[in-house]
Image: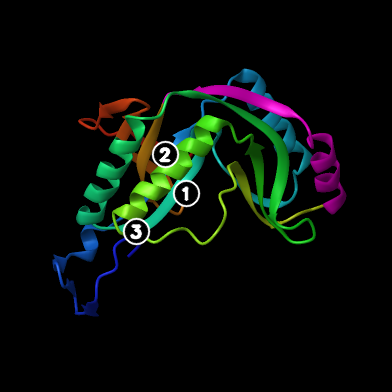
Amino acid sequence: MMGIVYMCTIQTVFFECNHGIINPDKMKRTFLALDIYPDEHFRKDIEAIRRALHGGQIKWVDPDLLHLTLRFFGDTDEHDLALISDAVLKVTAEIHPFQLTLNSLGVFKNFRQPRVIWIGSDHPAGLKDLKKKVDDELTRQGFHPEDKAFSPHLTLGRIKSLSAQNRLAELLEHYRDFTFYQQFIPQIVLYESILRKEGPEYIQLKVFTLEGIKGNSDTLSLQNG
């Protein structure tokens, strides 16, 4: 379990912890993210990248599900969900909406062994402030700091194999300093991710507006189709 660390002993069905009994069936795989809403031009750029890499084995992300992950929690129980919500609510009351620019194309792990293709973003003051304050508040709540440095990006696809490495090289060069899209960021979202064979399903657990909370009375289920 991410976040607060409890001393647990594994039983047949439940995890018995020093703060009570956690039913693993109630654990949710969660993350905090900024939603991205691509316009027609951005969608055409994404489609052009897909066409250029046609023939490879790549699991592409549905453009309607694009997001920038602020913090991934993994399996989270109800107790930690409440702590996360309290932490984010404190932070969003202090942060103003900001403009985000999506630019450049890149890959993880590296060019010779690419595993993920992504679009990067700039790092405006609003995003830096939001990320730092969220992390600081979560640390105060008892969550472990993240091991990796924050690298804001949108995952376009996960690469199993490429049909031609030179096409990827050409794309990376072409989009090196390319501005894909600019978007106003008015809120952040706490998501549950449900892994399915056809692709992940993301369910909104709570939406926080920058300068306050919008609410969580309704949930929105998005299916990667």
- Does the image show residue 175? yes
- Residue at figure coordinates x 40%, y 44% from the top left: 134
Where in the figure is residue 3, as x and y percent of width and height? 33, 60
Q: Are marks 2 and 1 in contact (CB under 8 Å)?
A: yes
206 shown above or below 97: below
The magenta region covers 165-186
Classify residue 220 by image quadrant: top left
Q: Which residue is mark 2?
A: 223
The N terminus appears in which quarter of the rendering?
A: bottom left
Q: Which of the two labelled residues, at mark 2 and mark 3, occupies the earlier sequence position?
A: 3
85 or 132, which lies in front?
132
Which of disc 1 and disc 3 is earlier in sequence? 3
Marks 2 and 1, how far apart in space?
Answer: 9 Å
Distance between the Cα atoms at labels 2 and 3? Answer: 30 Å
Of tags 2 and 1, which is closer to the observer? 2
Q: Which mark is residue 143?
A: 3
Residue at left 37%, top 27%? 210
Q: Amino acid at mark 3?
A: Phe
Q: Which mark is residue 198?
A: 1
| SS state under label 2 | strand
Residue 66 can be seen in this image: no
**Amino acid type for the residue under numbered disc 1:** Glu
Q: Residue 15, located in which quarter of the rendered image?
A: bottom left
